[in-house]
Image (tube, grey):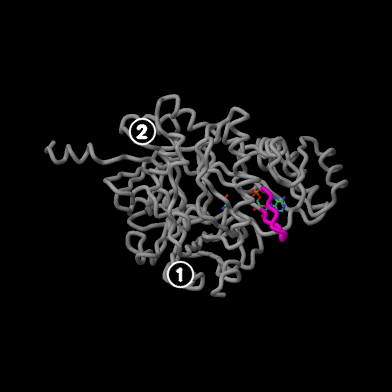
């Protein structure tokens, strides 16, 4: 090996991102674009990641195999994107082998993996959330619905990939959801226990922080669009678009969320003997009176919220995560682009029910870049005979950064007008709430 080549190998910092969505593409992009030579492996990755300089897909998903790779290749830091590996204990496996990984342990990830755990935790630590009760028996659950009335919300206890929540408008709908979860077995183990909770009114927002177990660093605020259809109608999805900042998170709301939800959560987890290190995502319902309640916790970044947040992050993401792992978050601050970032998800036909896959995508910008402020992150894409094809429900996220909501929206939709595949669907109104709230409406 030539000396120069040797030197380069030593100087390249290797990082590993676990996952394959647009969230992971955006995280890998930010990690790859920090100063110094970087190589970011994404496992298993997607066709968009394969086209990026400094990134490489890694066809591995088993935690032990990933740990073997990290050990052998001397990966400096592994970052976990989705909840499933966290809930399965990938952080515990890496830690037991002395490998540096960013994310909560299996015990801490219960904040997302069990709604019953999360609700009991919030009650114990007086963190505001909807009134609730937990059931394993249909009769008792139905009796509770009779007593409480509709609308009412039925949630499968375990991870159900966004399919475990039914907002029932009538008692009949509530009973049907209970029967399906407890008796129908549609959600398997995740639905063997249900949480029934009070229906909350207000506007939703995503509040995501980095936690080092004691201190937190809040990320820029964001809001997503959960429903498939324009005007926030139709089926619930993983998210059809997002933007940052979220106008609904005013300085007053921000202060309340930190004081009433985020800090008590991190302190409570520490007190309970399960310190929380990782991204912590609180799904909020913000009432007209400015009151805040926790709808759910996620033990990871949001998708699509990550994409606009990463577009705006100016600080070195690797540094922030390493400070968190050292318990030193109070010594750093994050710097944000003051402009607005907005992302639109392009989904396959029949998403979210049974997305059709294998369609060739045309009109993708070269290397995912449209211009300096506009780029495409890939989610479910694969390479087939030199073509990029759809490989799942949410296929791409188009992201733009600009001075006004109106301008970023226009830019994102201009890019989208050139992209095509059979059955492609997207919402035409991403950011409508921000448009109303901001001065440029
Ligand atoms: P979750 O996965 O718990 O965030 O629920 C998915 C979606 O269901 C949320 O984003 C809300 O739109 C809705 N939802 C969940 N819980 C409630 C509630 N208690 N009241 C009103 N809507 C809710
Ligand atoms: N966009 C919602 C989530 O990531 O859970």
Which picture quadrant has residue 335? Answer: bottom left
Which of the labelled discs sits on residue 403, or is there none? 1
Quadrant that contains the C terminus? bottom right
Q: Residue lying at the far top in this picture: please name it.
A: 96
Q: Which residues are magenta?
A: 285-294
* Between 268 and 105, the one nearer to me in the picture: 268
Left-right relation of 305 to 48 = right
Say what secondary structure mark 2 lies in.
Answer: helix
What is the number of callouts on the image?
Answer: 2
Dot 1 and dot 2 residues touching (CB under 8 Å): no
Residue 153 horizontal/vertical position (percent): 74, 49
Quadrant that contains the N terminus? top left
Residue 292 on the magenta segment = yes
Residue 101 horizontal/vertical position (percent): 43, 35
Residue 90 horizontal/vertical position (percent): 48, 32
Which picture quadrant has residue 141? Answer: top right
Q: Residue lying at the far left in this picture: please name it.
A: 2
Residue 170 on the magenta segment = no
Which of marks 2 and 1 precedes in the sequence? Answer: 2
> Few, some or many C-alpha atoms within 10 Å of disc 2 (few <14, some 14-19, many ≥20)?
many
Which picture quadrant has residue 144? Answer: top right
As drawn, 383 above or below 437: above
Structural distance between the alpha carbons of marks 1 and 2: 40 Å
What residue sits 82% from the left and 53% below the top?
A: 150
Left-right relation of 385 to 155 = left
Disc 2 marks which residue? 70
> Few, some or many C-alpha atoms within 10 Å of disc 1 (few <14, some 14-19, many ≥20)?
few
């Amino acid at each position: 090996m030539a000396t120069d080549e040797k030197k380069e190998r030593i100087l390249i910092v290797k990082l590993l991102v676990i996952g394959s969505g647009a969230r992971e593409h955006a995280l890998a992009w930010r990690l790859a674009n920090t100063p110094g030579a970087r190589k970011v492996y994404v496992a298993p990755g997607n066709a968009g990641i394969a086209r990026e300089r400094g990134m490489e897909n890694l066809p591995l998903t088993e935690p032990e195999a990933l740990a073997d790779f990290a050990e052998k290749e001397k990966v400096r830091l592994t970052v976990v994107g989705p909840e499933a590996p966290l809930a399965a204990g990938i952080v515990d496996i890496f830690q037991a082998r002395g490998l540096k990984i960013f994310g909560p342990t299996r015990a801490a990830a219960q904040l997302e993996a069990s709604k019953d755990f999360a609700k009991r935790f919030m009650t114990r630590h007086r963190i505001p959330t909807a009134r609730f009760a937990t059931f394993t028996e249909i009769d008792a659950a139905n009796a509770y619905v009779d007593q409480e009335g509709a609308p009412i919300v039925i949630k499968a206890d375990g991870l159900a990939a966004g399919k475990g929540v039914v907002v029932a408008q009538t008692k009949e709908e509530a009973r049907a959801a209970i029967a399906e979860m407890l008796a129908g077995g549609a959600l398997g183990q995740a639905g063997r226990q249900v949480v029934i909770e009070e229906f909350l009114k207000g506007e939703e927002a995503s509040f995501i922080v980095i936690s080092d177990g004691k201190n937190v660093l809040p990320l820029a605020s964001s809001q997503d669009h959960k429903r498939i259809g324009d005007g926030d109608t139709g089926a619930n999805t993983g998210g059809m678009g997002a933007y940052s900042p979220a106008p609904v998170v005013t300085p007053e709301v921000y202060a309340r969320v930190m004081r009433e939800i985020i800090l008590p959560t991190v302190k409570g987890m520490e007190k309970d003997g399960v310190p929380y290190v990782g991204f912590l995502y609180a799904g909020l319902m913000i009432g007209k009176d400015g009151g805040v309640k926790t709808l759910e916790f996620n033990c990871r970044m949001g998708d699509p919220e990550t994409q606009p947040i990463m577009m705006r992050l100016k600080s070195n993401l690797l540094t922030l995560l390493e400070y968190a792992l050292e318990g030193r978050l109070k010594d750093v601050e994050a710097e944000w682009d003051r402009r607005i970032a907005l992302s639109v998800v392009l989904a396959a036909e029949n998403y979210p029910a049974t997305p059709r896959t294998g369609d060739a995508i045309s009109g993708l910008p070269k290397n995912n870049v449209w211009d300096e402020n506009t780029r495409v992150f890939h989610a479910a894409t694969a390479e087939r005979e030199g073509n990029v094809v759809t490989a799942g429900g949410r296929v791409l996220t188009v992201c733009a950064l600009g001075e006004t909501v109106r301008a970023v929206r226009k830019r994102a939709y201009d890019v989208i007008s050139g992209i095509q595949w059979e059955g492609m669907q997207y919402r035409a109104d991403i950011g409508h709430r921000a448009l109303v709230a901001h001065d440029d409406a």
